[in-house]
Amino acid sequence: MATFTYTARTKAGERVASTLEATDRRAALLALDRLGLIPVSVSERGAGRTAPAARARHLSWHGRQEKMSTRDVLVFTVEMSDLLASGMTVGRALNCLAGRKTGKAGDRIIAAVRDEIVRGSSLSDALAMHPATFSGLYVSMVRAGEASGAMHEVLRRLVEHYERVQEVREKVLMALVYPLIVLVLGAATLLFSLVYVVPKFKIIFEQLGETLPLPTRILITGSSWFARYGWAGILGLVLVGVVLNRAVRTRRGRLWWDGLLLRVPLVRGVLAAGIFANLARTLATLLSNGVPVLQALGIVERTVGNRVIGNEIRNARERVTDGTTISAPLAAGRIIPKIMTDMLAVGEQTGDVSGALGHIARRYENELDRNVKIFTTALEPILIVVVAVLVGFVAISILMAVFNLTNGLNV
């Protein structure tokens, strides 16, 4: 028999720490289950443990860790919350979910988390072994749930948070769908004209031998160049795209790109509203679940999605002195809007920072809706005019040549 040290909670949420004897960890967990305790951590006294990073490498593919989709994580979180609310222990709930065979990466990840729980790890530590699937926000919230004894409530709040964040992202993406369709169709029409239509008219114009108008000569020259060197132009654009993509992936390149997006007209309104809504919602979720302010700001810095704003949050985190007041450090920079820091300061004065952050999140979500409408309303006619000018130039150039030749034949 081995001796195990455990930390657990009763159904009422009281913390219990003691030891018990069992043949292995699985038997120790079953013994705790029979006692009606919810295990937080179970470890064998004096026994070493396999490094979590080494165990996590078993779930990698060509050096890349397997990952669950956002939708699968949401489903997993909902089901875990329901199972824990019904009275199941964490180990039994994970064992129930791991028994499903969907053929996805989630099967192996959930099974690995369950096995780590059996070895004596806490749920937060087991989830932290899979950073590609479970973010720092997720792990910190679960750790707060373990400390408070209300795990299913924390998981339910996580579901609500991620659903709101996903909704904001979908609004931004939907705003870009129609402009992209217009651009693609316009480019396809222009290429078809240059490759197929213009060369046929070129043969006719050369046979008639008339002097062509300037726009028509420009069009024919452009069509001939594209027919000969179009592949080189496309290859050049691809290479430029690859180089820019790699440059943006660097620290300085990402900082430059994120700063540029915050200055581009139309785009900055949509992007900034989405970022600030996500920032406020994430910070409110963390603080309302007992995550310390400095740790919460660190998580927000990594999940905000914009390097410029992330740097501003890091600077604010370094300015925080008392560990509670964050409105003044955020206001000391020039990136966070004043109305946001003012509303946050009111929440600090009333003692309801999470509530103030919730109001801020809703305000920026409403602003996001308005900015998306403005973006689509302004961008659609701009793109239509650009496409119409390009396609119209092709049509007018050909028509001018036709009219010129017709007048010459009449004479």
Image: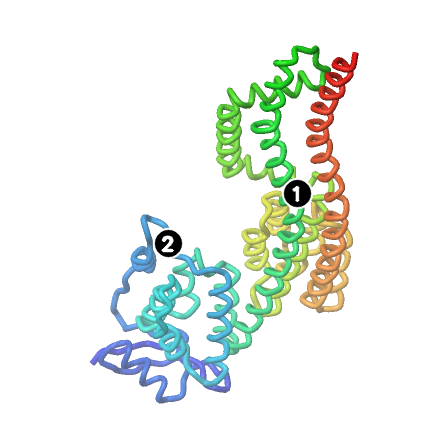
Q: Which residue is drawn at 50% across and 64% down?
A: 71
Most foreground residue, 238 or 23: 238
**Mark count:** 2
Q: Is residue 311 shown left or right of residue 72?
A: right
Q: Is residue 252 shown left or right of residue 274?
A: left
Q: In this view, does 122 lie above or below 388?
A: below
Crowd class of label 1 (few under 14; some 14 to 19; many from 20; radius 10 Å): some
- Quarter of the image with the N terminus is bottom left
Identify the secondary structure beneath mark 2. Answer: strand
Q: Residue at x 59, y 69 (%)?
A: 160
Kindly report which numbered mark, 1 or 2, lies closer to the viewer in this rendering.
1
Identify the secondary structure beneath mark 1. Answer: helix
Q: Is residue 110 shown left or right of residue 256?
A: left
Q: Residue 182 carries which label?
A: 1
Q: Residue at x 52, y 72 (%)?
A: 155
Q: Residue 207 carries which label?
A: none
Q: In the image, what residue type sits under mark 2?
A: Gln
Farthest-out residue, bottom: 35
Q: Name the residue under label 2.
A: 65
Residue 368 location in percent, x, y? 72, 55
Q: In the image, what residue type sits under mark 1?
A: Val
- Quarter of the image with the C terminus is top right
Crowd class of label 2 (few under 14; some 14 to 19; many from 20; radius 10 Å): some
Residue 135 location in percent, x, y? 49, 59
